[in-house]
Image: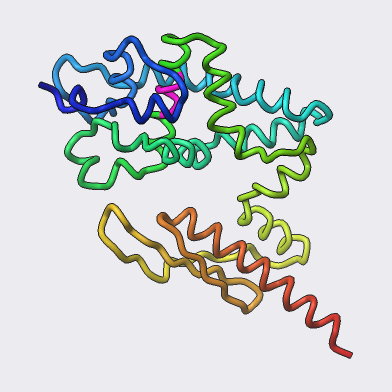
Amino acid sequence: MARERLLDFSPLEEALGCTFPDRALLEQAFVHPSDDTPGRPNYQRLEFLGDEVVGLAVSTLLYRRFPDADEGCLTRARAHLIDEEGLADVARSIGLGHFLSLGKGEEKTSGREKDSILADAFEALMAVVFLSCGWTTVLSVAERLFGPRLGTGTDIATFLRHIDRDYKTRLQEVLQNLGEPVPVYVVAEKSGPDHETRFIVECRALGLTAYGEGRNRKKAEQEAARRFLALMQTRTASTKKTP
């Protein structure tokens, strides 16, 4: 008997708030292309459909939640929620990695924790929700998973300020406005086993250095940029107080 057919999907159904009558289709949503078991289709076709399902569902959610927001703010918020990192975070919140069926190579390289794989599998899963349960259920699942990330207010500006993760872009813009070169990011340390790797990255600019830590290089760089911006604010405030 195939491994994935031994899995208990009830915790996933509880997390999503829906049930799946077609178990074979549900299982397909978790089969990564690296799993070359004969006769077992992978999730790529479902991912193709799920990309559109997720985009429209989150767009609908944002449109309803923020009735006064303009197109630019809505677009920015949507991009923030459904980029690779955002979808991977949602996938982790429902334990999606546990259900993945991977090839030996991806298993060895901690494929269950990779943002790219988790994001793709989540899109495939949402396609199954659409095909098995319909659009109304898709919107319900989107509200359940993405709703808490929007907060409780109806001011999209507050939401955007709260969840803005792109510190690297902000730091680059600040330095460019000052006529300074872009910052340099260097991996200072990489430690831990493959499934729990931790990165420490240095962000260097203006003769200063800030450090960031994360479970991959991208997140460590974002944290380093965030801390560098905070360091710049502290130095600016200190300079203004100096007589």
Is residue 81 located in the magenta-colored stretch of the structure?
no
Q: Which residues are magenta?
A: 122-126
Quarter of the image with the C terminus is bottom right
Is residue 123 located in the magenta-colored stretch of the structure?
yes
Q: Residue at x 20, y 17 (%)?
A: 40
Q: Horizontally, is 71 left or right of 8 in the view? A: right
Q: Residue 185 versus residue 6: which sits nearer the camera?
A: 6
Residue 181 spot, x, y in % from top left: 66, 66
The furthest residue to the bottom: 243
Residue 74 spot, x, y in % from top left: 72, 31
Quarter of the image with the N terminus is top left
Whether residue 189 is situated above or below residue 125 in the rendered picture: below
Whether residue 158 is situated above or below residue 39 in the rendered picture: below
Q: Residue at x 52, y 15 (%)?
A: 137
Residue 210 spot, x, y in % from top left: 56, 72
Q: Residue 84 versus residue 26: which sits nearer the camera?
A: 26
